[in-house]
Image (cartoon, rainbow, N blue to C red):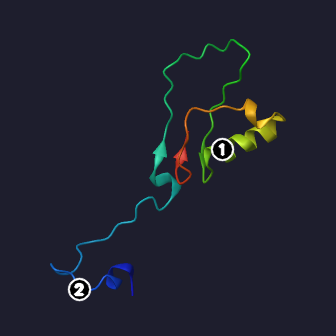
Amino acid sequence: MNELELLGPRAYGDALGCAALKATAEDFQVDEVLDIPLSGDGEHLWLWVEKRGLNTEEAARRLARAAGVQLRTVSYAGLKDRQALTR
């Protein structure tokens, strides 16, 4: 028995089809677009990161640990969906 059968009889006959939304991270992709130029000068390091299956905070935590810096020194542009492929 599937989920639709649990709903009981339908007023207009059988369902015409079924769908799976966001079955894999690749089904939902997010690319961050910056509206500021990156000059390569200055005291900050800019990283391009691709992640899947991680929320933004956990990704920042792992980056901080890998770089040997405190989490508060890692910043990011917005929160991204954990169930997505985000860049």
Residue 57 numbered tag: 1
Q: CA distance from mark 2 to mark 1?
A: 44 Å
Q: Quadrant of residue 42?
A: top right
| Residue 46 % position (x, y) | 66, 25
> In terms of depth relative to the viewer, which is nearer, 25 or 71?
71
Q: Residues within 10 Å of mark 1 (few under 14, many from 20)?
A: some
Helix, strand or loop status at disc 1: helix
Quarter placement of the N terminus = bottom left
Q: Crowding at label 2, few (<14), some or many (≥20) Cα neighbours within 10 Å?
A: few
Of residues 26 and 75, which is closer to you in this image?
75
In the picture of the structure, the residue carrying the numbered disc 2 is 9
Q: Is residue 70 left or right of residue 77?
A: right
The residue furthest left is 12
In this image, 10 relative to 82: left or right?
left
x%, y% of residue 79?
Answer: 55, 41
Q: Quadrant of the C terminus?
A: top right
Whether residues under marks 2 and 1 lie with C-beta atoms below 8 angstroms apart, the answer is no
